[in-house]
Image (tube, rainbow, N blue to C red):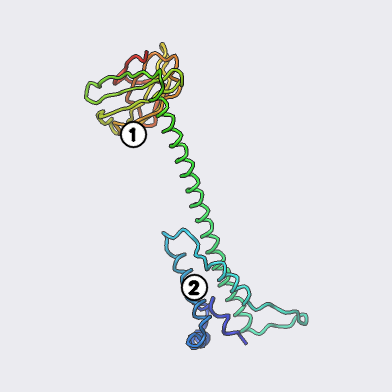
Amino acid sequence: MTDIHALAGAYVLDAVDDVERAAFTRHLENCESCALELAELRETVARLADPTWSVPPPTLRAAVLAEIRRTPQERPGRAGRAEPPRAGAWRRRVAVAAAAVLLAGGAGAATWAAQEQRVRDARTEAGAARDEVGRIRAVLAAPDAVVRGATAPAGGRVTVVASASRDEGVALLEGLAAPAPGRAYQLWLIEGATATSAGVLPSGQGAGTRLLVGVRGKGSFGVTEEPAGGSTRPSTTPLVAFALT
């Protein structure tokens, strides 16, 4: 005969017949532990059905272990002995219920792992941002820092602070006209006839601050409008260009 306490998993997944459903419903009126377990299982199912949920509920592992402990185990018997149909059906239903919770838990764990990776990535990015801010401040405070700049014909200004001792600089773009759709402003450090990319602003953006690396020995600085993502070399006439020395 089926243990009435073991019906919780199958009940919440609607894997019981009418007789078992009626019996378990009556049983819930007087069994506080089963009522609590049923509520936890329903919470698990509801959370897994919610596409915005990303953290496995803390009751998940306990619910799975409870289902496993309550699953009737097949005992050794005479070879070829047929199992009663009702018991066999129950075993299948419990297996399905346990598998459903386990699979759902696996999906939740995978989502949780992905979320954890996003957290780690965000921490890495935050650390890099803090490092860049520190380097920008060091350039601005460098005793050999020089300030150069120019105004764009259509309005806006580009300013560069460069430190040869640190071999770094800071470019500040303010109030430039937004580039055409699919285009972006690209920064260049220029030495003779050679222009080296010093960064690309996001597409459509006319203002921003960029840390420049490798300014030592560069004679000038320029800004051009390029395809979004940047070019290997300037493809248009510089919007602004000025000497750094």
Determine the residue located farthest toward the right in the rendered image: 78
**Between 132 and 72, the one nearer to me in the picture:** 132
Q: Quadrant of the C terminus?
A: top left
The spot of residue 120 in percent (x, y) is: 50, 46
Residue 73 appears in the rendering: yes
How many other residues sit within 10 Å of disc 1, few (<14), some (14-19) or many (≥20)?
Answer: many
The spot of residue 237 in percent (x, y) is: 31, 18
| Residue that badge 2 annotates | 40
Relative side of 8 to 207, left or right: right
- CA–CA distance in space, label 2 to label 1: 49 Å
Report the amino acid beneath label 1. Ser
**x 46%, y 21%: residue:** 166
**x 41%, y 33%: residue:** 133
The spot of residue 209 in percent (x, y) is: 35, 30
Q: Of the numbered discs in the image, which one, if any, rests on residue 229?
A: none
User: Do the CB atoms of the residues marked 2 and 1 lie less than 8 Å apart?
Assistant: no
Q: Quadrant of the N terminus?
A: bottom right
The spot of residue 206 in percent (x, y) is: 29, 31
Residue 237 appears in the rendering: no
**Between 37 and 82, the one nearer to me in the picture:** 37
Q: Of the numbered discs in the image, which one, if any, rests on residue 203?
A: 1
Q: Nearer the viewer, mark 2 or mark 1?
A: 2
How many other residues sit within 10 Å of disc 2, few (<14), some (14-19) or many (≥20)?
Answer: some
**x 72%, y 79%: residue:** 75
**x 59%, y 74%: residue:** 67
